[in-house]
Amino acid sequence: MDAKEVAARRAVADVQEGMILGLGTGSTATHAIRLLGERIQQEGLRIRGVPTSQRSKAQAEQLGIPLVSFAQVTSIDMTIDGADEINPALHLIKGGGGALVQEKIVACATRELVIICDANKIKPQLGAFPLPIAIIAFGWQATLRHLEAFSYPVHIRTHTDGSPYRTDDGLYIVDMACGTIPDPVAFEQKLKSLVGVAEVGLFTNLAQRVIVGYEDGTTQIQERS
Ligand code: 5RP
């Protein structure tokens, strides 16, 4: 069994009639969106989704999942999303798929952020995965210099043809190879205070529940205390 799908299935089983749901982005979240579509088809489950990227929006539309925006809702009951790394305090690195800005806006408007993953994402410390930082395109060279001052290797994310990757919001992404991040809460605040930085892929104190899926079909659930 696909461990990511196992985690997604467990999370989607908790979705209840009438919920407003944040729809995450990435290969794990894709399973959750597909399984939500199945529940809508098979059980007539009525939910409405807030997508975190154009990709998730397109998938949800294709599956007939009704969508709403922040013009229609003020809070989200539950968001199901993936992550690149998760530490024992349930702080996260997200943004490997480039959707960190919309993912964080949705996460911050959500009563329960449920992270689904396989066991490879669980780490004793954050930082082995390069930290995605979304920056405003104007003056990106100046912002990059501010980020270089932290003395970690940084590079602008590009497509295979060398052109800069742009988020759905037209931002650039800098990937910062930190190695380890001993204090994710303080580091998130430090990076966010820099001019030109739009959002940081550190999601601290946001996840309430992490569901780890395993190939044998079992799950392990971690809750934030
Ligand atoms: C996208 C994300 C993803 O949730 C994260 O990159 C994990 O992706 P995957 O489920 O494909 O491993 O933050 O911006």
Image (spheres, grey):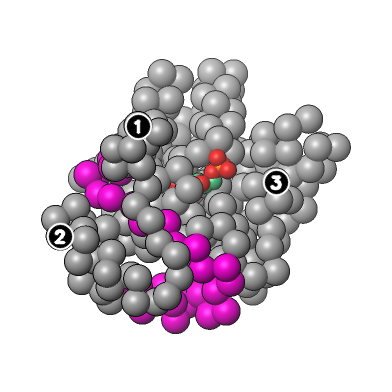
Image coords of residue 22 (percent x, y): 43, 45
Q: On the image, numbered disc 1 is attached to which residue? A: 161
Question: Camera-side residue: 67 or 167?
Answer: 167
**Residue appearing at x 27%, y 69% in the figure:** 145
Distance in Å between CA atoms under marks 3 and 1: 31 Å
Q: Nearer the viewer, residue 50 or 132?
A: 132
Mark with earlier residue (2, 3): 3
* 106, 198: nearer the viewer: 198
Alpha carbon of mark 2 to alpha carbon of mark 1: how far?
22 Å
Q: Is label 1's Cβ within 8 Å of ligand 1?
A: no
Q: Kindly state the secondary structure of the residue where label 2 is placed.
A: loop
Q: Where is residue 173 in the image (x, y as percent from the top left)?
A: 34, 52
- Does any atom of ligand 1 lie closer than 8 Å to the CB of label 2? no
- The residue indicated by pointer 3 is 118
Residue 139's tag is 2
Q: Is mark 3 on a helix, strand or loop?
A: strand
Q: Is residue 190 visible?
A: yes
For the point 40% across and 33% down, which residue is it? 160
Decide whether residue 172 is among the magenta residues.
yes
Residue drawn where x is 29% and y is 37% of the image: 163
* Amino acid type, label 2: Gly
Provide the residue span drawn in magenta. 166-192
Residue type, mark 1 in image: Asp
Image position of 160 (left or right of 184): left
- Could you tell me which residue is drawn at 55 percent across and 35 percent down? 27
